[in-house]
Structure formats: structure tokens, C-alpha cells
Amino acid sequence: MPPIVKITNLDKYFGRLHVLKSVSLDVPERQVVCLIGRSGSGKSTLLRCINFLEEPSRGIIEVGGIQVDAEDKSKERRQLVHNVRLTTGMVFQEFNLFPHMTVLENVIEGPVTVKGMERSQAIELARQNLENVGMLFKADEYPLRLSGGQKQRVAIARALTMQPRVMLFDEPTSALDPELIGEVLSVMKKVAYEGMTMIVVTHEMGFAREVADRVVVMSEGKLIEDAAPEELFSHPKDPRTQALIDRYRSEGA
């Protein structure tokens, strides 16, 4: 079976700054991959290139059989990018909920306006996903009245209501107070155990150990190590990986 996400020789420049350097990565369906590395190593940029929130400079990105060449200048490319975005759900660090909409309105906005889903169907699906993340009781509240952990759980429900085949998480707990991190990680574990393909940029090593099928380490825009968590954390092959693990341990991660 071909991978659901396939990245081939991906480069990304910001001006003269070479942020991603010939990155290639395959992710099979239903697999959970955690991306770890120091700040500035290119993790979030890689994630954002997968659904074209950042435009890659060179390389090929394929998601769910939809292939986009970064250097393609054809008119058809815009539709291909749109189709990739419909296939991926994204959860950000800062939640990005609309403050003037209730929780339920936030969750149904994408399916109704982007996918053209019937409002009644979107509401039913949204209520199911809010129930799954433990937030249905807040369906009629506004984001201002939610904690950070609750906002992030709503954001996960919103992404799931788009019915993606792949979920992308960009450091989803980094903006949360420590006591709220666990509630978001527990929801992410549930999503993973239900079979969702997930690519997660994270500093939560406990989550990576417990939930990931693979942990991929980035350094200076390159993938330097890719292994199962028990192997990577016990016997890292690259000294930069060992230094990263030691750093996390010293910080109590």
C-alpha cells in the first residue's frame, strides 16, 4: 500500500535562508509520526508545507494520492492544493477560533463554507466530534469563556469535522499552562488509537514514547534520525539526537 503522505526532496527558502534541505518522508496510513528537534530546526515549516500554508520552494508533496510539484506553475495546481487541504486537518499552537462565533458555529464553519456540507449534517457531525473531545457541553459558549485546553479540544473537533485523512498538529500544547496539557494529549491519544494518520510537531516526549509509531528528528532543516520510539530514545544513532534527549530530560520533559 502506498504511503498516504509522501514528501520527496523538499526544499524551502525564506529569502536566502535555506530552512528545509532536500527533506524526504513517507507516512503510511494510520501511522502516528512525531517530529522533534530544537527550535528553528524546520519542524513547523515542514508541517506547514504539507498543506501549503507555506509554499515549498522545490520538491514534490503527495497526500492521499494527490501529488503537487512545488515548481508546477499550471492553472490546475491551485485545485490540487485545494484538494490536499481538504484531505488534511490542522491544529495550531494558538487555537485560531473565531471569537464572534460559538463553539458549535466554529466547528461547522469549515464543512459548510469550504466543503458545501448541508448545515444540518455539519451540526450532527460537529456534535459527535465535540462529544468525542468532551466539549459538547460548551457547544453554545463563546471562545472567550473557555480555558486554553478547552479551546484546543474545540480546535481538534473542528479539524476532525472536516473529515480529513491526515491530521497535522503544530506543537498543540506549547501555548497551554502545564495543568491543561494532559487534557489535550489525552484527546490526541484517543484520535490516534481510533486510527487517524497523524504528524505531530511536539516537545512532549512522554506522548511521543507512548503514542508514536515513529519519531523523526530534525536538525538544521534535515531529517537526521527516524526510528521507533523505544529504539530512538534508548539507542539514538546520531549524537545530535542524544543531545536533544538529554536536554529534554534535564528540563523534566
Image: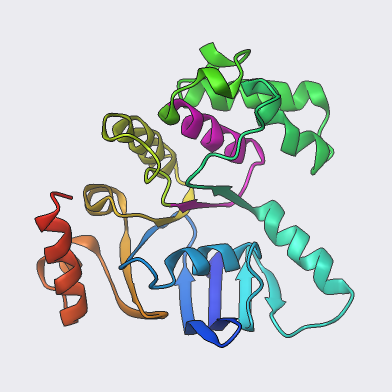
The answer to whether one can see residue 2 in this image is no
| Residue 229: quadrant of the picture | bottom left
Position of 5 compared to 81: left or right?
Answer: left
Residue beneath the point at 18% across and 50% down: 253
| Residue 166 is a magenta residue | yes
| Residue 160: quadrant of the picture | top right
Q: Position of residue 112 (x, y in %)?
A: 80, 34
Return the residue nearer the eye: 122 or 244.
244
Residue beneath the point at 54% across and 76% down: 7
Q: Position of residue 84 (x, y in %)?
A: 69, 61
Return the residue nearer the eye: 93 or 241.
93
Position of 126 compared to 241: left or right?
Answer: right
| Residue span colored magenta | 150-170
Q: Position of residue 98 (x, y in %)?
A: 67, 32
Q: Is residue 72 above or below residue 148?
A: below
Residue beneath the point at 57% across and 24% down: 143
The answer to whether one can see residue 59 in this image is yes
Q: Is residue 161 above or below residue 205?
A: above
Q: How is the image coloured?
A: rainbow
* Farthest residue, direction right: 75
Q: Is residue 153 above or below residue 229?
A: above
| Residue 52 is a magenta residue | no
